[in-house]
Image (tube, rainbow, N blue to C red):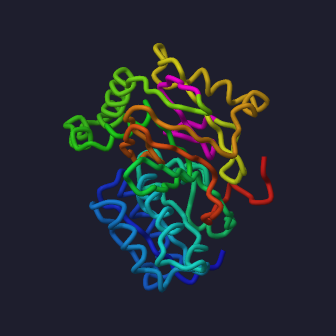
Amino acid sequence: MQFDRALVFFNPASTHTGAALRRIGELKDILGEHNVTTVETSPEGRTANASLLEKQGGILGESTLLCIAAGDGTTNQVIEALLTSPKLNSAVRKTPILPLWGGNANDLAHMLNGAAYRTHIKDILKHGRVVPIHPLQCKMSSKGKPAETRVAACYASFGATAIAAHRLNRPTHRQSRLQALPGGRILQEIITVVSAFMEAPAFSVKEAGDIKVVYEISFYNGSRMAKVERLPARLTDEMFYLNALKDKPILFLLPIPRFIEFTHKRIAQKFLRTNASFTTQEESWAQFDGEPVHIPPNTEIQMQLSPRPFYALSTTLNSDNKK
């Protein structure tokens, strides 16, 4: 691939910043230091980072590689801004993105180009192809509030995993003393996720006129969620997987048995969808690529694949090879 320049969004507070900085160095060695612009993300979140992207609109386009040296949450913010900001035109929206494994799970980076430890930037630039990917698009409407639309490149969920994502993003988790100990970060993650799943309440949704009680409703756009490859799927497929759990897992804090079923492609077909809708009856939590959102009661949820794709540089996906 031939790119004139690279724009890197860098989150200095993200996990594995040292490795991310080394990859930025690789980019500078290949493209030339003066052709690589690094922008630090804002701790103020989604709106502030969208504004940062909009300010760079003049250099974005198909000849610029937009890299994200941060985790899936920041990558989600960049993709959403790229697709939805009214200040960016159609040419800018075709800017190819490349996540640089700068966070914790790095699910999108793995699905696009494999594991970080065996991947080099020069190989991605040499062998990668730009592929269109239609992310999940979720429209949320509640009485008295303007409708809100969110996108998720990899996955979205309502219920237990969203509560876990919310707790993983709290300062009490991120600032835990365990984080400073060898192996402490992973141990703290396990403690936080286990407690979230144990305490997650069931919630009611109305679907096609029927009331259902569930612990989790999950949507998957690719094969990987939370560091685990689970589905026989590709990001370039034109359908998504829907999974609803009516019973709280007891022996398994994550619904592993159901995902083992998913590994059998014939069984997995029954979970494929092109759209889904339901209305929450109580307040709940949602997460989009790990970014938690509080959902008020009586919120109508409409899920589909976005008609507008984002473009990504990938060595593992081929737009002509769809499952």
Vertical placement of 25 versus 15: above or below? below
Vertical placement of 220 versus 127: above or below? above
Residue at x-position 62% and y-position 36%: 242
Out of 255 and 244, give the one closest to the viewer.
Answer: 244
Q: Main secondary structure of the magenta part?
A: strand
Residue at x-position 37% and y-position 51%: 144
Out of 93 and 84, give the one closest to the viewer.
Answer: 84
Residue at x-position 49% and y-position 56%: 149
x, y percentage for residue 65?
55, 73
- The verdict on residue 60 being magenta is no
Vertical placement of 168 versus 118: above or below? above
x, y percentage for residue 93?
57, 73
- 256 lies left or right of 172: right
Vertical placement of 102 versus 62: above or below? above
Q: Quadrant of residue 182?
A: top left
x, y percentage for residue 266?
79, 30
x, y percentage for residue 190?
36, 29
Q: Quadrant of residue 224?
A: top right
- 320 lies left or right of 217: right
Q: How many marks?
A: 0
- 231 lies left or right of 43: right
Q: Which residues are magenta?
A: 210-230
- The verdict on residue 211 being magenta is yes
Quadrant of the snapshot with the N terminus: bottom right
